[in-house]
Image (spheres, helix red, strand yellow):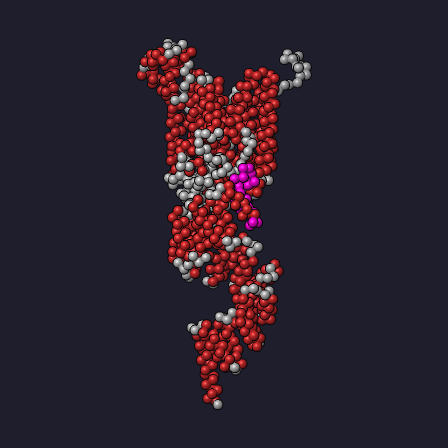
Amino acid sequence: VVSPTAREGSTTTSTPSPRYRTASWAAGRYAVLAILCVLCYSNSLRGELVHDDVWAIINNPDVRPGSSLRNIFSNDFWGKRMTDNTSHKSYRPLCILTFKLNIVLGGMTPLYFHIVNVFLHCAVTCLLMHTCECCVFEDSRLAFVTALLFAVHPVHTEAVSGIVGRADVLACLLFLLTFLSYISVAVCVCKDSLPSTVSVWSLLISLFLGTCAMLVKETGITVFGVCVLYDALVFVLNKSTWRLCTAWCCPEGKDLFGFTLSMSLVILCWLNIRGKECGLADLQSVSVSLSHLSGSRLRDLFYICSPFIKRACLISGYVIIIMSVRLWLMGGSMPLFSEQDNPASFSPHLLTRILTYSYLLSFNAWLLLAPIVLCYDWQVGSIPLVESLGDMRNLATVLLAVVMVALCLHCVFSLQENRGVWVGLLFLVFPFIPASNLFFRVGFVVAERVLYMPSMGYCILVAHGLGRLCSVVGRWGTTVLSIFMLLLFLLFSWKTLQQNHVWLSREALFWLYPRHASAMNNLGTLTRNPEEAERYYRKALNTNPQHNRALFNLGNLLKSQGKEKEAEALLKDSIRFGPHFADAYSSLASLYAEQKRFHEANEVYLKGIENCPDSSDLHNNYGVFLVDTGEGELAAAHYQQAVRLKPAHYVAMVNLGRLLRSSNENKEAESWYKRALQVTRKVEILAPLGALYYNTGRYEEALQVYREAAALQPESTDIWLALAQVLAMAGHTKEAENMTLDIISRERSCIECYRLLSAIYSKRGNFTEALDALDRALQQNPSDLTVRAELYFSKGNQLREMNQLDRAFESYKLAVELKPDQSQAWMNMGGIQHIKGDYAAARMYYQRALLLSPGSKLLKENLAKLDRLERRLTGGD
């Protein structure tokens, strides 16, 4: 130890300053938290995109690089229009933007999505500790314990390991930033001055951050309620408030209690009547004190409260405005959920709804306290309804109510000493309100990811309780509590690592306990073995006979196996238990159409459109059905309605283009194909557009389109073959030949390739090579008799060009034996006999051809020539 009075010239060692040591300790704690978060979720980095990730990212057109940013701000989280009655109304454009940025920078690789989620969790954990240090705990160690517990809590696994959970994690980050901005920048929380608005711009920044939190996930808007209540409590507890109010309203120190009661009426949160401080004990003295408050003193009181009132009014008005905009974006309607999503809300009994909703609160609290059983999807059947007061689960509800009331009373009567409790309650209760079914129906029974934000309050309460216990149990008791907390951290870390394994793949996810109907149904959709899939679907229906998706999936499976009666019954039940499930209507109608029961199919489609008027897929499928039944005009109307309902419905656009193309309305068809290409560049759009260009002689445009299609789907033989055909027609025969030979080298059974190769050689005059190509095609022995007949016909044409008439005749003969309605083959046979001088046989073949093509001018001319020859020969005799 170096003496502070070291002699001049002596050597000393400098010690770090207290400020340096504090900064180093703080940096070390942040580093520990970040490392702990990374370690806990390191095994999640190799996970796939599972469960809701498939719908929010893989199948969501809004996240694709070429999609319009406008769609992100007009569609819901899943890529549906907000006004669609099948939309969940989850408006989260900023979260979708992060997915889009992920794809732009790293493609669809799941690793990069997981890295971002883990990084955000690290940021939230560190920011939570900073928040606790600023406005919750005076002891930074308690803030560190809070963050440690938050970092490793297993209930966060769904939010961090599941990519869709990014909405909760990012919203939580913005929640904390908004809160910090409001309390430490917009509001001065000094002990010696009144909490006044320091900077309007800083307050606007907090409004902006809160709005961003809401645009990431709806629960983000609850931060404004937390900010206002915290502001009110800070105002009440501020010593300067008491000093100034006493000086202005109670100059003689007589009316302090009356002022206190008046303040409580103005602020609506001051409930702690401090009778001892004023020396007043009964209500009579209260009324006397209130009578001493003159009008001028009330004005002084309002002056003191005015900064807080202005902030509260500003935030309240702003929340009303953004909520109104939100409701407008939703089309003025709430989302429609099925009984499977939230069975309690569909119960006809008020008591059942109240008891079940109350029990679910205690169930969520238990998940925070003891996350032993975690599940990706707590849907119908996983948590039975509470239908009577005698249900033992009501005890859990009563226990939770007692605990919450006790905490609130404890806060009310000792606000200053229990800042951790009331901040913990604010953070616990407010973010959970949107998921509580209190104001509107939600689309789930329990969702672990919605506990991500409320768990901050839980962690604060645990740390506060730990601190209070340590203050009363002494040194050895503190050691025991520290060991207990260390064991809890280790246990939670182990559980988190184990739970991460569940989110690595869909197969692992669906094997979770409890194995409810949805899990069995999802496992059925994953397996490729029809027998195994059927077993899973039937297990799902044994658990819940009304599971409309399991009924639908099993019905489709049996339909593909030819078990049409049972499939029909299952699909009908799927519609009965899910009347707004559009896919079930389409599947049942297609079953009727396959059975030629067109009238019933039509009725099912119309009923489906009546119950699901905003289903674009249903309108598109009905359009396909109408085309097959010859009602093209009505089909076009439904295709157009599908596009109106979903402007990005490129399938309906392509179908409409094909319909117009069949009516030779090529210009209109082309415009619809191009409109579909503005949505997405897919082969199924490019191919019919290329065919349109090819059939209308626009070969250069066809080449451009088919080259793009081949680049998108290089393994497609059909695309390369179509491109080779266009090259041949455009005069690029050498390139067409090389391309066709390349296709044959990869797929020797490509009969159309040999036919194209024959046409290319024939066009060049290489008849021998052309004939050899046709022979190689016939060697493939095609099972389709029509294809074989056409090959023999082409071979006959080639032999006729080579003047091998006898062989040509035999080829034509084989062609008509396989396909007797080939009038051209009969006519060519007649022509050969005509040339050979067998006029009787020629007439017979011509007449057979004329029966098949009575309007053929060429046949009639040939017959006329034959008549003239026969008359000449007869006259010569």
In this rendering, is residue 346 above or below 861? above
Magenta stretch contains residue 11: no
Q: Residue at x 61, y 19 (%)?
A: 479
The reply to whether residue 679 is in sight is no
In this rendering, is residue 96 above or below 704? above
Please give left or right for residue 580 compared with residue 771 in the image: left
Q: What stretch is highlighted in magenta?
A: 509-531
In this rendering, is residue 768 above or below 580? below
Q: Residue at x 66, y 14 (%)?
A: 2
Magenta stretch contains residue 529: yes
- Residues 254 and 165: in front is 165
- Residues 678 and 653: in front is 653
Q: Which residue sits furthest front?
A: 390
In this rendering, is residue 92 above or below 201? below
Percent x, y of residue 112: 56, 40
**Quadrant of the frame with the N terminus:** top right
Percent x, y of residue 616: 42, 49
Percent x, y of residue 833: 52, 79
Q: Residue at x 41, y 19 (%)?
A: 271
Q: Which residue is drawn at 56% across and 66% down?
A: 755
Residue 226, located in which quarter of the rendered image? top left
